[in-house]
Amino acid sequence: MDLRNIWLSEPQDFTPWLAQDGNLKILGDALGIELELEAQEKNVGPFRADILCRSLDDDSLVLIENQLEKTDHIHLGQLLTYAAGLQSVTSVWIAATFTEEHRAALDWLNQVTNESVRFFGLEIELWQIDESVPAPKFNVVSKPNDWSRRVSQAARQMNDQPATEGKALQLKFWAAFAGHLKEQKSPVRPQAPRSQHWMTFGIGRTGFNMHGLLNTREDRIGVEVTMTDANAKDYFNALRAEKDSIEDAFGDSLEWLELPEKKQARIARYKEDCDLYTENRWPEYMAWMRERLEKLDKVFRQRIKGVGKNHETEL
C-alpha cells in the first residue's frame, strides 16, 4: 500500500503512530533493541527531532528520524545534527525508500565510528490482505557490523587491562553465551560481551534490569532482576508482597535481597558448585542460565511495568 494512504503527514500522523508502545515494539524487534519512549518532537537547538527513545538493553538514547519518501540529503544532515546535539549512541533513519548513496553513507558511518555509536537505516512498507487492517513491515537496509565490532572491542579490552585468567574466561564465556542465545532463538537479548562477571538484559522499563552472573571466585552462576533508581526499595517491597505467586510462576524459590546498605535491590537465583574452568560444562551452565533468564522475563516483565505506578502518580 502507498504509505500516504494511511499517514498523510510525518509529524501529525506517522510520528504519533510510531510512538505508540505496540508500534515501537515492532520497530524494536526489527532493530534487536528494546525501546521505551522518551519524547516526541524533541527540541535540539532550533530543530526538532522526531522521536527520542531509550534502549532498555543498556539505558542509552536512541534517536529516530522519519521520512515517508525517498531518502534525501536534508534528512541525513538532520540525523547527524540531532545525534550530535542529543549525544545519542543509536541513530535510526526510517524512510519509504533508501537511495544507494544514503545506504552507503550509513554503512560508512558504522565502519568509521567506534562500537558505542550505531546507525540503522530501515525502509517501511504497508501490507494489506483483503480487508485486513494494514500492517507495517520494517526492512533493515543498513546496520552496524556487530560481529567485527565485538571482536575489535574484545581485543581492545584484553589490551587495555590486565589479562588475568578470570577476565579472559569471563569474556570467552559471555561471547559463547551470546551465540547460544541467538542459536536457541531466545527472546532475551544481551549486550555486547565484556570481561566482567555480569551480562545485562532489558526487562521493559528503565530503572530495572536482568543480569546473568558468572562468579569465578565462588564457583557459581546466577540470574537476577535488579532495581536501581530512587524508588528501588519501594519497588522491591511491592514485588516482595507478591512473593508466593511470583515464585509459583517462576517454578522455584528466589533470594529476595533488599540490600539495606545500598540504593539498589535485587531478586536472584544462584547455582552453586560450578566448575567454570572446565569448558565442556559450559553448555550445561548456559542452558541453565538461559532457561531462568527467560522465566524471569516472563514472570516479572508485566509486573514491573505496573509496579509503583500509583506511587509515581501521587508524587
Image: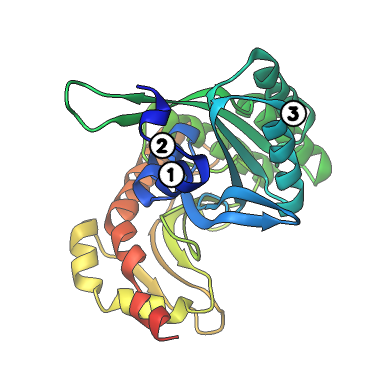
Q: Given contact means CB atoms under 8 Å apart, are the residues at marks 2 and 1 in contact?
A: yes
Query: Residue at (48%, 79%) from the top-left corner?
Result: 231
Q: Earlier in the sequence, mark 2 or mark 3?
A: 2
Query: Residue at (30%, 31%) from the top-left corner?
Result: 135
Q: Earlier in the sequence, mark 2 or mark 1?
A: 2
Please identify, in this view, whether the residue under mark 2 or under mark 3 is nearer the observer.
2
Q: Which residue is mark 2?
A: 7
Three-letter amino acid code at the position of disc 3: Leu
Indicate the quadrant where residue 175 lies: top right
Q: How far is the residue under mark 2 from the one under mark 3? A: 30 Å
Q: Which residue is mark 1?
A: 13
Looking at this view, is 162 or 44 the one in front? 44
How dense is the environment of label 1, judged by Cα within 10 Å: few (below 14), some, or many (20 and up)?
Answer: few
Query: Residue at (24%, 57%) from the top-left corner?
Result: 250
Q: How far is the residue under mark 3 from the one under mark 1? A: 30 Å
Q: Quadrant of the C terminus?
A: bottom left
Q: Position of residue 186 (x, y in %)?
A: 36, 36
Q: Which residue is mark 3?
A: 109
Please identify, in this view, whether the residue under mark 3 or under mark 1 is nearer the observer.
1
Q: Is residue 275 above or below residue 94?
A: below
